[in-house]
Amino acid sequence: MPIPEDVTGDEIDKDVRQELQSLPKTLAEDVAKNLVMVARLIDEDPEGAYGYSKVALRLASRVAAVREAAGFAAYANQKYSEALGEFRAARRMTGSVDLWPVMADCERGLGRPEKALDMAGAPDVHKLDKAGQVEMRLVAAGARRDMGQLDAAIVTLQSPELASNSVQPWTARLRYAYADALLAAGREGEAREWFAKAVEADRDGSTDASDRLAELDGVEFVDALDDSEGDSEGDSEGDSEGESDGERDSDSHDESPNAPEEDGDKD
């Protein structure tokens, strides 16, 4: 797959770069570039990221970082069985527990929420850092919801991290999940309160908490382009009443809002 000229491979994390030192220099550079493309595309173009991960996997399947990247690319494409296999391989290579929550979520994706709950209660969870433990809590709550256990999901999310006023990287998602569970349980007033708290913590727009809050408040968003088109049509109708077809300004016939430019960003 083609690699853009601006990708050098130097963009990768220093720990990954260190792993690649076991490879011949040229091969390491090629693998690094493909890993950069996986990271660059995984949010906006998961299929593209998956393709680059496959290339990296063919080049260096014995590198843990490559197996991990392949796992996340498969996960982003909802290929949960494949993702789980790659995560297990990476874990065997490194002995790290960091992938435990996403492995449990793969079990959910495969329709095995009971297995995800078993993993949530495993000793390995205690070895996770705070972010990993919160992630595991989110997965466990999701598994409870998969099983129709809404009240249990709500209780699972109740934690010191949820109650804390401190904003951490996981805070917005944790509050959002709690609000969503409350809403599913019919507790709309509490859900609104927690969606509002999620909005306060969501500084980078990682959730749609603001939209969910607006829905609960009955706020409707109107597309500005639609308004412009409506106004244009109204003006055109008004003009037609006082002018014949031949008298209308020819410039008005094809007048329409410019299409928004495609925004290339970012995941």
Image (cartoon, rainbow, N blue to C red):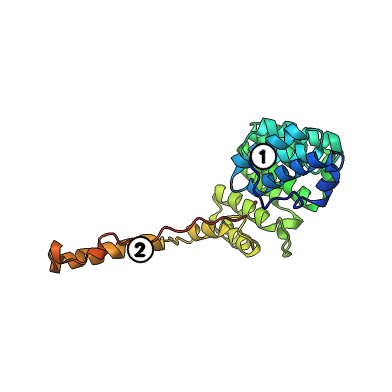
Q: Is residue 205 above or below residue 77?
A: below
| Inter-mark Cα distance, 2 to 1 | 42 Å
Q: Is residue 38 above or below residue 240?
A: above
Please name whichever residue, 133 or 16, is drawn nearer the observer in this view of the structure: 16
Under mark 2, the amino acid is: Asp
The x, y position of residue 220, in whole percent, is: 43, 60
Residue 253 shows which numbered tag?
A: none
The residue identified by callout 1 is 52
Camera sees residue 75: no
Give the image quarter of residue 126.
top right
Describe the element under mark 2 as helix, strand or loop: helix
- At x 82%, y 33%, the residue is 62
The x, y position of residue 63, in whole percent, is: 81, 37
The residue identified by callout 2 is 227
- At x 39%, y 61%, the residue is 258
> Which one is earlier in the sequence, the residue at label 2 or at label 1?
1
